[in-house]
Image (cartoon, grey):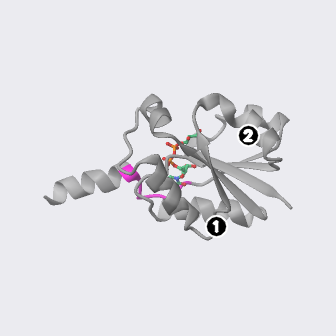
Amino acid sequence: MKKVITYGTFDLIHHGHINILKRAKDLGDYLVVGLSSDEFNALKGKAAYHSFEERKMILEAIKYVDEVIPEHNWGQKVSDIKSNNIDLFVMGSDWEGKFDELKEHCDVVYLPRTEGISTSKIKTDLLNQQ
Ligand code: C2G
């Protein structure tokens, strides 16, 4: 069984998120998502609309996602890869090259981002509609 992992905040789930989850799952048999905790989001300078538990529930309802684990910090990826027997690490192309050190432990693939959508765009567009 080929196990894939990807990480993110996945707030206000949109088709860009679904696209990366679908493509990541298509590259293997089992997809683990490292979901950023609310505390880690604060470190990333992000304030998610949905709490970790709400974002976890939504992700677990997506057919491409097999398992959700918490992402607490930048440094846990190697131990996650080892403890979950991960074969492939996938991220969107906005992270191109940023996680290449993981190539010592598994394959690393960056997939093209879905253009024209982002959680911050959703927030901005909704504000402008008011
Ligand atoms: N993404 C995408 N297309 C978009 C928006 C997002 O492909 N239009 C991808 C991102 O490239 C990322 C994933 O969806 O691979 C999740 O994006 P975010 O929720 O914004 O996560 P991010 O803030 O990038 O956190 O340790 C890694 C970090 O946790 C990643």
State which region is magenta.
Answer: 113-119
Rendered-image quadrant of the N terminus: bottom right
In the image, taking residue 43 as reference, residue 75 lies left or right, namely: right
- Nearer to me, 16 or 4: 4
Rendered-image quadrant of the C terminus: bottom left
Tell me the SS state at disc 1.
Answer: loop
Magenta span includes 15: no
Q: Which residue lies most toward the bottom here?
A: 63
- Nearer to me, 65 or 15: 65
- Nearer to me, 22 or 69: 69
Image coordinates for residue 20, horizontal then vertical, percent = 59, 59
Mark 1 lies on residue: 64
Image coordinates for residue 18, horizontal then vertical, percent = 54, 64
Q: Residue at x 66, y 57 (%)?
A: 67
Q: Residue at x 68, y 62 (%)?
A: 66
Q: Are marks 1 and 2 in contact (CB under 8 Å)?
A: no
First in residue order: circle 1 vs circle 2? 1
Image coordinates for residue 6, horizontal then vertical, percent = 65, 49
In the image, taking residue 13 as reference, residue 75 lies left or right, namely: right
Tell me the SS state at disc 2.
Answer: helix
Q: Residues within 10 Å of mark 1 (few under 14, many from 20)?
A: many
- Nearer to me, 83 or 96: 83
The three-letter code of the residue at mark 2 reads Asp
Q: Is mark 1 within 8 Å of ligand 1?
A: no
Mark 2 lies on residue: 80
Q: Residue at x 39, y 45 (%)?
A: 48
Main structural element of the magenta stretch: helix, strand or loop?
Answer: loop
Q: Residues within 10 Å of mark 2 (few under 14, many from 20)?
A: some
